[in-house]
Image: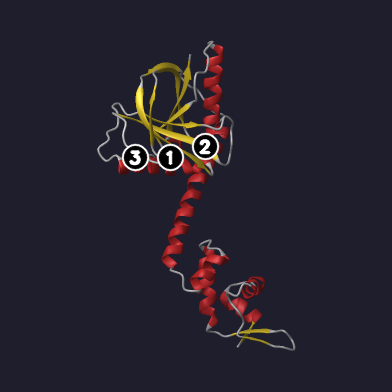
């Protein structure tokens, strides 16, 4: 049998880590001397130690490793970890983009135009999102639900799709969002999907390229433009996502049109 120090050297785990894994029930010594408290491990436990170390290098939590040791499907846990890492990767890319923007001292420049947005029939769904990141899953889920109950419904041409924020104030959590898409006619409704006719409206339009976290600059510009030119805001701002994570690899290539209805 191996003393804890010897086992530490062979397993490449610190004594502190071994005591932690013992406390968590992941790697319990084969024998503890009742008089001295010395801990002893079997050489056969080196394989278990190596497995724990490899899982920890994948950033699995102790609870996830416990679940695996208890017989949970490894593939299911690792698949969830992949999704988590992908989200982290996207978050990191966004932060890098913002940092580069600051370092390069780029001035955000927008070209404002006045657009006439015609009357349209839209289906819509309103949902409270825990955080903004859920928006990119909410939109396709809303589209899929509308198609499910209206399989023959066609989108309008040219296509027109947008999101509006309904809270009346900026919120980081529990954000109320309405997603709308123009269609050729009204269809079947349920507890989620509704239809309405939106009137023709004049709007200030600008295009924002880059991370959504920088949209605040676009909102500041468009509000300042409206005020400077004597326009009165006549409705909620609309965000139209033209290019994004679904079709562009680089955050810098994401393209969003911001429309502000005016009178």
Q: Secondary structure at mark 1?
A: loop
Q: Quadrant of residue 224?
A: top right
**Nearer the observer, disc 2 or disc 1?**
2
Q: Residues within 10 Å of mark 1 (few under 14, many from 20)?
A: some
Q: Report the colour scheme.
A: secondary structure
Q: CA distance from mark 3 to mark 2?
A: 19 Å
Q: Which mark is residue 250?
A: 1
Q: Is residue 31 left or right of residue 234?
A: right
Q: Which mark is residue 176?
A: 2
Counting residues from the N terminus, which is met first, the one under dot 3 or under dot 2?
3
Counting residues from the N terminus, which is met first, the one under dot 3 or under dot 1?
3
Labels 3 and 1 touching (C-beta < 8 A):
no
Is residue 262 visible in the rendered image? The answer is yes
Q: Residues within 10 Å of mark 2 (few under 14, many from 20)?
A: some
Identify whether 115 is placed above or below 150.
above
Q: Which mark is residue 146?
A: 3
Q: CA distance from mark 2 to mark 1?
A: 28 Å
Residue found at the far left of this picture: 152
Q: Secondary structure at mark 2?
A: strand
């Amino acid at each position: 049998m191996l003393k804890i120090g010897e086992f530490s050297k062979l397993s490449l785990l610190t004594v502190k880590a071994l005591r932690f894994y013992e406390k968590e029930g992941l790697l319990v010594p084969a024998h503890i001397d009742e008089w001295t408290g010395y801990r002893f491990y079997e050489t056969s436990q080196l394989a278990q130690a190596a497995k724990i170390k490899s899982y920890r290098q994948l950033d699995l939590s102790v609870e996830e490793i416990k679940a695996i040791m208890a017989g949970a499907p490894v593939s299911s846990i690792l698949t969830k970890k992949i999704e988590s890492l992908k989200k982290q990767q996207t978050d990191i890319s966004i932060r890098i983009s913002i940092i580069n923007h600051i370092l390069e001292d780029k001035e955000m420049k927008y070209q404002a135009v006045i657009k006439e947005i015609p009357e349209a029939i839209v289906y819509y769904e309103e949902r409270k999102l825990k955080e903004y990141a859920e928006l990119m899953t909410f939109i396709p889920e809303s589209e899929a639900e509308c198609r499910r109950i209206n399989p023959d419904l066609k989108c309008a041409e040219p296509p027109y799709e947008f999101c509006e924020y309904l809270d009346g104030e900026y919120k980081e959590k529990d954000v109320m969002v309405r997603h709308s898409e123009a269609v050729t006619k009204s269809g079947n409704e349920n507890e989620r999907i509704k239809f309405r006719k939106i009137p023709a409206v004049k709007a200030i339009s600008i295009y924002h390229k880059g991370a959504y976290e920088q949209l605040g600059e676009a909102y500041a510009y468009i509000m300042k433009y409206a005020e400077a030119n004597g326009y009165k805001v006549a409705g909620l701002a609309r965000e139209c996502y033209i290019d994004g994570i679904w079709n562009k690899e680089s955050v810098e290539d994401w393209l969003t049109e911001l429309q502000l209805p005016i009178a």
